[in-house]
Structures are given as C-alpha cells and as structure tokens.
Image: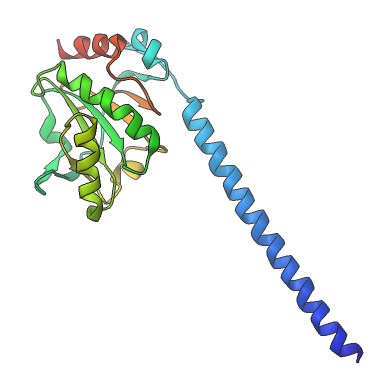
Amino acid sequence: MKKAVLIPVAILVIAIGVALGIWLFVGGAGWLMEKQQSEFEAGSTIVAEGPLKAYATGALAKLETHAAPRPIEDISFLDGEGKTVKLSDFKGRVVVLNVWATWCAPCKVEMPTLANLQKGYDPQKVLVLPLSIDKAEDKAAVEKELKLSGGLPVYMDSEIQPMSKWGIVGMPTTIILDKNGQEVARLGGEAKWDAPEVKALLDALAK
C-alpha cells in the first residue's frame, strides 16, 4: 500500500521539477531577449566619431559614425525580378542600406520616411536600398509592404547574411555607404529618414 502511494508522489515531484525548470528557462530567455532589445533600441554602445560626428543629432541622434570608412563584406542577394546582384554593384553612389523584414513593426513604421528620402534624390547618386531578410515564399508580402510605403525597389536575402557578415544584432538597422562602397555610419533602430539632418549628411557624402 505504501509503494502505491509513493509512486504517484514521486511522479508529482518530478512533474513539478520539470515545470519549474521550463518556467525558469523560458522566463530567463524572455528576460534576456527583452534586455538585448532594450539595449539595441537604447543604442548603449553608440559612438559618434570622425568627420561625420556632427551629423549625429536630431533624427540621427542614435547614429554611429566611424573615425574612418570601414570595408563591408560583399554579399549577393536578389532583386525584385529574381536576379542576383551584389552589394559592390552599387559602388559609385551613396547607399542608404536598410535591413528590414515584414514581421518587424519598427521597420514598417520607418519605411515611408525612407521612400520619401529617395524621392529627393536621383537613385544613381543616392540610393535607398531596402534589403528584406524575409523568407523567399514571403516575397508577395515584401512587395506589398514596399508598395504601400511609397514604392521602393525590392531586394531580398532569405539567407539572412547581414546578421553574421555585417554584425547586425537587431532590426531595423541602416548602414550608410560612401561612393567607394565603404561603411561610414550605421543606425540601429527606427528613425525618421526624411528629416533635414539626414539630407545634410547625404549631401555631404554625395559631393
């Protein structure tokens, strides 16, 4: 009789232990993700230095500028027609390289301002390049979002290369490339890209 009572008790203790372990794991993971996202949005490691430091103000207050241009790894991705293009194909113009996804709410909020920014420039001189990391099967959703936001061109990298090759830890992240195809600044998080501060920065780079 005692054995019959002990077995259910043992099972109950094990079940409670497993449930507690899962709760701690999920809760801890959730806390860590929230902490990382908060740090990303707050820009806790932002450093503005070099000749573009003065532009890190107003809408670009979270802009990280570099002491000198930095090389960025050349990757291949697809354009709206499914053709393979490389980042280096856009050398010769200033590039506002925006890494985004349709499931990223802040990305969708800032996209219309990026579209407005492009309207003020010849894309052969200053190009806004929205690079989606959505899955290939979600191309229709990407096209729809870009059309609703102002008609920017479609570029997709379903391999999610920017995270590992460009050191991106959250989205949206926007990288500014000079005419030599080198990174001169980046901004993690949402921004108002059609603000006067942005135009001043791009005009300086496009000279």
Check the image and report above or below for 39 versus 104.
Answer: above
Judge left or right: residue 184 versus residue 18: left
Check the image and report above or below for 134 versus 14.
Answer: above
Farthest-out residue, front:
148
Tell which of 118 and 66 is nearer to you.
118
Q: Quadrant of residue 71?
A: top left
Give the image's coloring scheme: rainbow
- Residue 113 at x, y percent in the picture: 27, 22
- Residue 173 at x, y percent in the picture: 35, 32
- Residue 142 at x, y percent in the picture: 23, 43
Check the image and report above or below for 39 versus 184.
Answer: below
Image point (12%, 31%), residue name: 90
Is there any visible trace of residue 176 in the rendered image?
no
Is there any visible trace of residue 46 in the rendered image?
yes
Count of numbered labels shown in the rendering = 0
Tell which of 71 and 56 is nearer to you.
56
Farthest-out residue, right:
2
- Residue 58 at x, y percent in the picture: 39, 11
Judge left or right: residue 82 versus residue 198: left
Q: Quadrant of residue 202?
A: top left
Image point (36%, 7%), residue name: 54
Image point (58%, 49%), residue name: 29
Q: Which image quadrant: the C terminus? A: top left
Tell which of 94 and 110 is nearer to you.
110
